[in-house]
């Protein structure tokens, strides 16, 4: 009797919380902090450093939110639009209609992702406004596009597999999925692994910015 009770408890443990079974992610403030505080904080500090020296971190945070909302909704809308050559994310990356070798397809997808950010630069240029500095758009664009191609596509993972199989979850960036209720990951998920992309991209852009300011187009002394 005691043995059968033990067996029932053990089987129940394996089914509900044992190895291989992970609880679905809960949308709580504490989970949001654990999953995204590091990536958001790093992004804000680095973007603020790329912007003009006296820009406020709060403004940079709003600018980061604007860019990430922009790309989240373009991506989400592209999934609602009919498949055509103009809807190239679906056409080439999801439906794979171009039938490209995997490496070319990912290279093309990097370009497709970047075009969503370049479109924002173009719109600002056409309307002669600068809600977000171009360098910050490039920074978040390269971060997003590199994460999609390297962290989510070249390195197999369940988070992005769900985006490709169920199509209406995990559009990215993941904290935007959290905000708009489309994040489907396991409990304990964090976005920390993508922080390295931001640091590397920041370093390259900051070096380019330094080189342009000091060697290529130095401002003449007053
Ligand atoms: Zn993908
Ligand atoms: Zn997609």
Image (spheres, grey):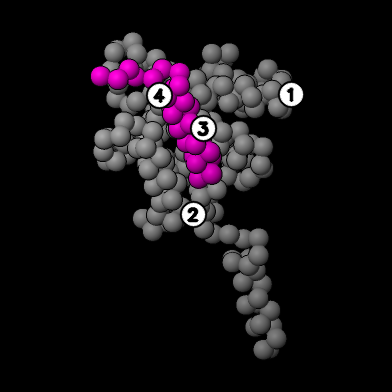
Q: Position of residue 46 (x, y in %)?
A: 41, 40
Identified at 60% across, 40% down, the residue is 151
Disc number lying in front (3 or 2): 3
Identified at 67% across, 19% down, the residue is 97
Sequence order check: which comes first, mark 2 or mark 4?
Answer: 2
Q: Are marks 2 and 1 in contact (CB under 8 Å)?
A: no
In the displayed orientation, state which residue is furthest to the front: 221
Residue 108 seen in this snapshot: yes
Q: Which residues, given as a range, are shown in magenta?
A: 195-222
Near-viewer residue (151 or 20): 151
Task: Answer few, some or many: residues within 10 Å of disc 4's Cα (few below 14, many 20 plus, some between 14 and 19).
Answer: few
Label 4 SS: helix
Q: Position of residue 206 (x, y in %)?
A: 45, 32
Whether residue 157 sits left or right of residue 48 in the image: it is right
Tell me if residue 13 comes above or below residue 215 in the rendering. below
Near-viewer residue (214 or 95): 214
Label 3 SS: helix
Disc number lying in front (4 or 1): 4
Tell me if residue 92 comes above or below residue 193 in the rendering. above
Sequence order check: which comes first, mark 4 or mark 1?
Answer: 1
Residue identified by numbered label 4: 213
Disc number lying in front (2 or 1): 1
| Magenta-drawn stretch, dominant element (helix, strand or loop) | helix
Residue 180 seen in this snapshot: no
Task: Answer few, some or many: residues within 10 Å of disc 3's Cα (few below 14, many 20 plus, some between 14 and 19).
Answer: few
Disc number lying in front (3 or 1): 3
Whether residue 35 sits left or right of residue 51 in the image: it is right
Residue identified by numbered label 3: 204
Near-viewer residue (222 or 86): 222
Q: Quadrant of the C terminus?
A: top left
Disc number lying in front (2 or 4): 4
Q: Which mark is residue 84?
A: none
């Amino acid at each position: 009797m005691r043995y059968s009770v033990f067996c029932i408890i053990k089987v129940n443990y394996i089914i509900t919380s044992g190895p291989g079974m992970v609880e679905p992610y809960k949308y709580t403030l504490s989970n949001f902090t654990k999953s995204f505080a590091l990536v958001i904080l790093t992004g804000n500090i680095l973007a603020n450093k790329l912007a003009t020296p006296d820009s406020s971190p709060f403004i940079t945070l709003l600018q980061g939110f604007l860019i990430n909302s922009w790309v989240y909704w373009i991506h989400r809308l592209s999934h609602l639009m009919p498949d055509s050559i103009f809807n190239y994310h679906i056409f080439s990356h999801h439906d794979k209609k171009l039938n490209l070798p995997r490496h070319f397809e990912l290279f093309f997808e990097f370009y497709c992702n970047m075009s969503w950010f370049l479109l924002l630069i173009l719109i600002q240029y056409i309307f002669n406004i600068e809600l977000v500095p171009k360098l910050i758009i490039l920074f978040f664009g390269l971060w997003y596009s590199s994460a999609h191609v390297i962290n989510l596509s070249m390195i197999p993972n369940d988070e992005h597999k769900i985006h490709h199989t169920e199509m209406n979850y995990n559009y990215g960036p993941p904290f935007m999925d959290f905000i708009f209720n489309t994040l489907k990951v396991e409990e304990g998920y964090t976005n920390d692994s993508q922080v390295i992309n931001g640091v590397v991209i920041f370093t390259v852009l900051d070096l380019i910015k330094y080189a342009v300011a000091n060697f290529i187009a130095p401002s003449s002394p007053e």
